[in-house]
């Protein structure tokens, strides 16, 4: 994890886990565009009324999010990207999205994006009728956000230089910090390295569900320097009699690597950054073996610990 910059001249903001969107009113025509220029209002029609608050030739930068049970729900966002208009309309009523604004780019034709951040932030806070993303110049507050973000479903903290203009697509004057977490998982299988004989490329990971069965939760690449050690521990546990298969596409698009199941007797601690649905969103990093832990103790509580019912939800961020 990179450290938040501590010098003066920085503003800290939550990193929302949703869909980034530019909301614009260009001469009375409303549109919301993703970073890849994908139109988004079709999938989030409940946000269209916000356009009435935008004068012509205006644009805001922000994040589309869905908040449920006090936390940001990225999985619910994914369900909205559906070709059926009837489904989108139904979901927009059942689980409405919000647009959280963190920057003003254009206002009634004025190129606000050219102003330094500290002046643009004043424009953001002057907006009426919009959900405004919180921001602080207090490093202690920003670090406190990182401590709370796992439970709130957020994705980290962004530090921005106060004196910088808006720089689309640039990392200059910006630092993104995510809090990496760790979990103990059962090794349930492996994938062989393509073209190599009995050389382990990836460990497959699982957690026990309430019913006692193992759920596949993701994979962990094996570094070259650890392959001999991993092989010594895992290969003796290969068990062709186990009818366990995993369906996870090869991210490089080169087809599936051959896989094999192993007896669930090994526990590893892995570092991860985010869980999406029933999988780690990205690859994990092997931290260490956990000989001291019983595989049966590796349950979904590793990734979804019970939430304190008295803990503040994501709405509390807007009251800070």
Image (cartoon, grey):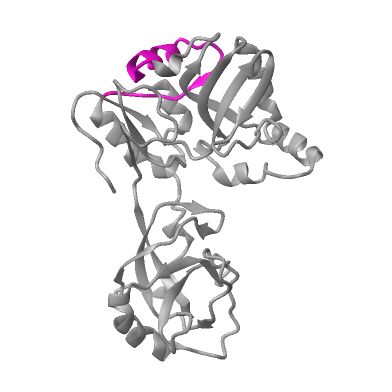
Total numbered badges shown on the rendered structure? 0
Side of 159 where 249 appears, left or right: right
Q: Position of residue 103 (x, y in %)?
A: 45, 22
In the rendered image, is residue 20 in sight?
yes
In the rendered image, is residue 308 in sight?
no
- In which quadrant is the C terminus drawn? top left
Q: Position of residue 303 (x, y in %)?
A: 44, 56
Using the image, determine if residue 11 lies above or below residue 223.
above
Depth check, front residue: 283 or 280: 283
Using the image, determine if residue 130 lies above or below residue 40.
above
The span picked out in magenta is: 115-137
Q: Residue at x 66, y 13 (%)?
A: 27
Depth check, front residue: 232 or 209: 232
Quarter of the rendering containing residue 225: bottom left
Side of 70 where 91 appears, left or right: right
Side of 15 where 245 appears, left or right: right
Specify whether residue 127 is painted magenta: yes
Q: Position of residue 14 (x, y in %)?
A: 40, 33
Side of 59 where 10 appears, left or right: left
Depth check, front residue: 159 or 315: 159
As drawn, which residue projects farthest toward the right? 86
Using the image, determine if residue 107 lies above or below residue 143.
above
Q: Residue at x 60, y 31 (%)?
A: 33
Specify whether residue 128 is painted magenta: yes
Q: Position of residue 195 (x, y in %)?
A: 47, 84
Q: Residue at x 44, y 40 (%)?
A: 154
């Amino acid at each position: 994890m990179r450290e938040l910059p501590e010098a003066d001249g920085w503003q800290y903001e939550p990193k929302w886990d949703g869909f980034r969107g530019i909301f614009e009113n260009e001469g009375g025509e409303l549109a919301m565009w993703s970073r890849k220029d994908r139109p988004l209002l079709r999938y989030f029609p409940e946000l269209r009324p916000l356009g009435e608050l935008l004068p012509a030739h205006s644009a805001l930068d922000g994040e589309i999010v869905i908040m449920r049970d006090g936390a940001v729900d990225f999985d619910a966002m994914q369900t909205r990207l559906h070709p059926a208009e009837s489904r989108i309309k139904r979901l927009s009523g059942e689980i409405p999205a919000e647009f959280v604004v963190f920057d003003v780019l254009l206002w009634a034709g004025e190129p606000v994006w050219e102003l330094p951040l500290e002046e643009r932030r004043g424009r953001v806070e002057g907006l009426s009728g919009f959900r405004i993303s919180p921001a602080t110049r207090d490093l202690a507050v920003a670090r406190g956000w990182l401590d709370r973000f796992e439970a709130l479903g957020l994705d980290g903290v962004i530090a921005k230089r106060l004196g910088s203009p808006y720089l689309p697509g640039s990392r200059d004057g910006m630092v993104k910090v995510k809090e990496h977490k760790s979990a103990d998982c059962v090794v349930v299988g492996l994938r062989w390295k393509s073209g190599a004989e009995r050389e382990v490329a990836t460990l497959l990971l699982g957690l026990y569900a309430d019913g006692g069965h193992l759920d596949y939760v993701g994979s962990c690449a094996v570094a070259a320097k650890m392959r001999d050690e991993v092989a010594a521990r895992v290969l003796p546990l290969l068990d062709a009699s186990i009818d366990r298969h995993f369906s996870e596409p090869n991210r490089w698009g080169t087809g599936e690597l051959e896989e094999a199941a192993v007896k669930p007797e090994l526990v590893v601690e892995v570092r991860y950054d985010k869980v999406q649905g029933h999988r780690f969103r990205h690859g994990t990093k092997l931290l260490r073996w956990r000989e001291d832990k019983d595989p049966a103790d590796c349950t979904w509580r590793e990734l979804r610990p019970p939430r304190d019912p008295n803990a503040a939800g994501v709405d509390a961020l807007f009251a800070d």
